[in-house]
Image (cartoon, rainbow, N blue to C red):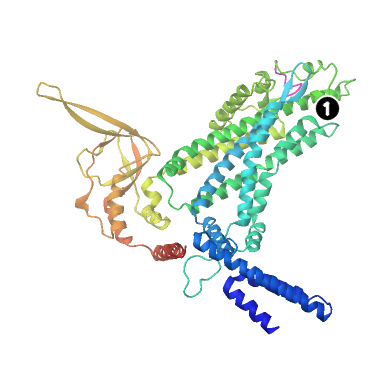
Amino acid sequence: MDDSISSSTRWTRMYGDSACLKSSFLLLFAHSIPWPARTHKSIYQFFQLAELIHGVRVHLRMRYHREKGVRDPDIEGQIHSGTVQKWTVNFLHPEGEFLRIWKLIFLVSCVFSVSVDPLFLYLPVINDERKCVAIDRRLHVIASCLRSVLDSISLGNIILQCCCPCIDENARPHEGQDGVQLVTDAWPIAKRYLWSPSFAIDVLSILPIPQVLVPIIVSEMRGSNALKTRKMLTAVVVSQYVPRITRIYLSWRKVRKINTTLPPIIIMVKAGLINLFLYTFASHVLGAFWYFHSTQRETACWHFACENYIGCNRSSSYCDHSSGNYTFLNDYCPVEKENPTMFDFGIYLEALQSGTVASMDFPRKFFYCFWWGLRNLSSLGQNLQTSPYFWENCFTVLISIFGLLLLLYLIGNLQVPMFREVSDSRLQLICEYINHVNYSQDTYIIREGEPLDRMLFVTKGVIWKFATTNNNNGVGSTVSSSRGECIEEGCYCGEEILNWGFHGFSQQVLPNLSDLPISDKTLKTHTKVEAFALMANDLKALASRCAGPTPTEAVLMIQEAWRRNKKVRNWRSRASNT
């Protein structure tokens, strides 16, 4: 027995781990058979011979592959699998290039997915002749396909969240190690994601609620409780917007966290086009709900009319389930001539009178509803004439609230660009040095060529800002011309002084009044002006208090530099190992 074990050891040293594993399995298999001793000995010799033959075969194959320069997949299988695992971890690194691109793609898909959802609200179409509701089958197929494709991207993101290594923020690096600590085991990664709120939000976001419930709301609602059931299902459809909008917000935060230095094109898009997108998206959603609720209000009128009309036993307003003569509904639900005493359609009367809800031409009704949403969102819903219907008034209140929120968001982005880079603590100090000033009408504040010693934030009145250019008329004399702009309430001027003041902040040098920038334009009041002024002397005093970073900012700067240094050293060590 000792000879057999030593033989197995020799073959293992000569021919690798695969021969060792196979020989160990054969020996264990031979010793586990409870046969007579003689039979056992012959079987053992047979397996020992098979082990010898296998070792010779491996030896010859290794020699052949070494001469031909070909890698042996059996011998180098473990090395290859380890390399693949290491490559996979690097490829799916939380701060790697792949996840940077994927998170941006996922964010765009979430935005498009939310924009596709309102298309399901255009499915019901009113048939005026038969007084019933049909479904736009073609639009249903197109919207369902688009939603399914976008949901497949979300499903892929869920799978990646369960597989990608994650950073262990609670782990402390061991001595001699640097860089972030990654969790690469499958179960801890999946467990961490499955128990997080993000998993519930992702699952709720991809549920096919509009694909299933909207056709049910239109076609399958029957009986006396149909209206209540419709309202409940409509609320379920609307409620899915909460996790879907939340998912967009969380995705945007992840993109900003990973892409700490965004390209200039992304910054430009965020600064300009995001406000436009929010307005267009909100108008798209409000217009779609206005269309959908218009169809629901007309079917509700039909339902109330049938309850009061003798001989009307209509159980469903769906065209496939409805038959008979219902022309009496024109008297109970007048659309062409408004009659609030019979039934008050409120803000939905416009959609019914224009024939939008009865049109199968999707581009026509889409752009008409989109314009309705954009028009009323811009005016904060002030021109809407509502009925006493409770949910209609709630809808108009939401229009006003959304309009105000978008306006506040837009105003919040209209800030002085230089102040966006200043911390909150320094902004509070700046506010302490701002003074309230008054200027009478037709007063020169600063003339062209004079030192610019103040920045003004206009709160009331109008200031002219213009530059004078001298042009030669060819006769030897010059003609002066002016080009100017109007600075009104809520605007500012003289922001060039901030470059002079904040240059001292960054260079740790106090600004000098002799280096004040020269104004290239003239500032003159057109009316009586009230404003807040930040003077050059005050900005210099402010610089003396803020010549260096605050203690909190210094700590944050040191921590950020340390993390950046560790991250660079970690990537360099990985590159050297690979």
Q: Quadrant of residue 448?
A: top left
The question of residue 253 being in magenta is answered with no
Q: Which residues are magenta?
A: 337-344
Could you tell me which quadrant the N terminus lies in?
Answer: bottom right
Pointer 1 residue: 316
* Location of residue 132 with respect to 428 vertically, above or below: above
* Location of residue 120 with respect to 334 vertically, above or below: below
Left or right: 527 with respect to 287? left
Q: Residue at x 43, y 44 (%)?
A: 267
Q: Residue at x 68, y 39 (%)?
A: 238
Residue 368 position in % (x across, y down):
60, 24
Q: Residue at x 68, y 35 (%)?
A: 144
Residue 356 position in % (x across, y down):
66, 21
Circle 1 residues within 10 Å: few <14, some 14–19, many ≥20: many
Q: Residue at x 22, y 43 (%)?
A: 518
Q: Quadrant of residue 552?
A: bottom left
**Does the image show residue 183?**
no
Q: Quadrant of residue 130?
A: top right
Q: Secondary structure at mark 1?
A: loop
Prevalent SS, magenta region: loop
Left or right: 103 with respect to 438? right
* Location of residue 211 with respect to 570 vertically, above or below: above
Q: Nearer the viewer, residue 73 or 448?
A: 73
Q: Nearer the viewer, residue 166 or 544?
A: 166
Residue 142 position in % (x across, y down):
66, 31
* Location of residue 209 with respect to 369 vertically, above or below: below
